[in-house]
Amino acid sequence: MTCYEIETLLNLDEQQYQPFIMVLVVVLGGVFGSFLTCMLYRVPRGISLSSPPSYCPSCQQKLKAVDLVPVLSYLCFKGRCHYCKTPVSPRYMVIELCMIAIFVLAYIMTGLSLQLIPALILAVSLAFVVGLWVESRKVATKVLLFSIMMSTVLYLLKC
Ligand SMILES: [Zn+2]
């Protein structure tokens, strides 16, 4: 199956579904932004990504679903922990907003095409590399190499 055939299969009536797709892209950007904040906190500290579940670093309270959306929880709880009221750094919200903006830009640039998936993977991995360097001055070499590989895939998909 050629790239053209795959893109033809994916070629929904994009104009008709544009608002739905944009909402989906924003939600996905938020989910990956939230996951990115988790990774940027845990990886430099050597904490597993899967366990324990997300918690407040101040009061150790396990976070509920409403607390796991940094933009919403930051606005709802006025920048404080839902439980102990300790101020929460706005960086979680900023990272999530940046990921949403990057996802929307990637969608605008590629449209609903085969290039969108490697573009989003590339965006998440590069955001992790940059975020980890800013957080801890560590270079995520393997993720950087993966990003280079993804950019090659992205280039090759321009068929
Ligand atoms: Zn707390």
Image: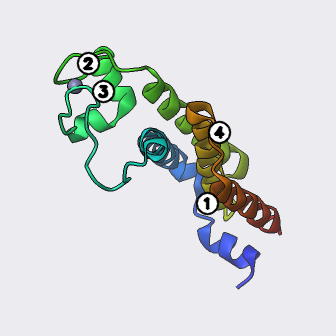
**Residue position marked by numbered label 4 in the rendering:** 130
Q: Amino acid at mark 1?
A: Ile
Q: Position of 111 compared to 32: left or right?
A: right
C-beta proximity under 8 Å, tags 3 and 4: no
Q: Residues within 10 Å of mark 2 (few under 14, many from 20)?
A: some
Q: Secondary structure at mark 1?
A: helix
Task: Pinpoint residue 9: horizontal percent, then vertical percent.
Answer: 62, 74
Q: Amino acid at mark 3?
A: Ser
Q: Does residue 76 appear in the picture of this structure?
A: yes
**Residue position marked by numbered label 3 in the rendering:** 73
Question: Quick one: label 1 or label 2, which is nearer the N terminus?
Answer: 2
Q: Does residue 112 appear in the picture of this structure?
A: no
Who is closer to the viewer here, 19 or 98?
Answer: 98
**Residue position marked by numbered label 1 in the rendering:** 117
Cα gap from disc 3 to disc 4, whole angstroms: 24 Å
Q: Residues within 10 Å of mark 3 (few under 14, many from 20)?
A: some
Q: Amino acid at mark 4?
A: Val
C-beta proximity under 8 Å, tags 3 and 2: yes
**Residue position marked by numbered label 2 in the rendering:** 77
